[in-house]
Image: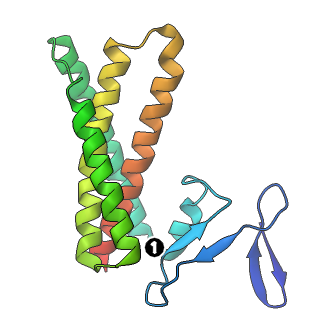
Amino acid sequence: MASMAEGNEISICRCGKPLVSKTSWSDNNPERRFLGATTMVMDLPNHAAFLNGKVILEATILTAVVIVSLTLYTFWAAKRGHDFNFLGPFLCGFLLVLIVFCLIQIFFPLGRLSVVIYGGLVSIVFCGSIVYHTDKLINRYSYDQYIWAVVSLYLDVINLFFSLLNLLRAADG
C-alpha cells in the first residue's frame, strides 16, 4: 500500500508501519537501496519498478529452465550412484569469495562489467548449490528433515533468480 504525505509517496507495510528506505552513501550510485523492512521476495516489486518486463520474463524463464534441468540431472546422476557431497566445501569457499567481492563492490563500485561478472559467478555458484542440495534431499535427509531441505532449495532458487535478474539488468543497459 502507499499513502501520500505532502506530495511524497510513502510505502506502507502490511502491518501499517512505513517501510524504512535508506540509500547508499554514494550519490553516483542511485540504484543501491537498502530496505530494512523487506525480504528478498517482498523486494521484487521494487526491482520490477525499475526494470522492464522483458528482463524479468527472461530471468523467470532462465530460472525455470535451469531448475528443471539441474533437478533432472541430479535425479539421473543419483540413480547411477553419483555423489555430489564434494561440492559442499567448494560452494562455501566460493560464497566467501563472493561476499568479499560484494563488500568491495559496495565501497568501491567497479562498474557495469563487474556487476555482470558478479551476477554470472553467483548464478554458477547457486546452480552448484541446487545440485548439492537436491542430492542431499535425495540421499541424506530423513523424513523429519525434508522441510529444511525444501527451505534450502527455495533459497537457492530465489538467489539464482535475483542473480540472473541482476546479470540481465546490467547486460541490458
Q: Is residue 39 left or right of residue 115?
A: right
Q: Which residue is mark 1?
A: 51
Residue 52 seen anywhere in this rendered image of the structure:
yes
Quarter containing the C terminus? bottom left
Would you place residue 156 above or below residue 102 in this image?
above
Q: Position of residue 73 (x, y in %)?
A: 20, 27
Name which residue lies at 43% across and 90% down: 28
Callout 1 crowding tier (Cα within 10 Å): few <14, some 14–19, many ≥20: some
Residue at the image point whose x is 35% and y is 71% from the top:
105
Quarter of the picture containing the N terminus is bottom right
Which percent across, then down, holds residue 54? 38, 68
Residue 99 figure quarter: bottom left
Instruction: Tell me the kind of residue under disc 1.
Output: Leu
**Up-down: is 130 above or below 21?**
above
At a point 40% along the width and 41% down the height, the residue shown is: 156
Residue 122 visible in the snapshot? no
Drawn side of residue 143 relative to residue 161, left or right: right
> Which residue sits at x=79%, y=68%?
18
In the image, residue 102 sits, relative to residue 126, either above or below, namely below
- The secondary structure type at the circle numbered 1 is loop
| Residue 56 screen position, x and y as percent | 42, 62
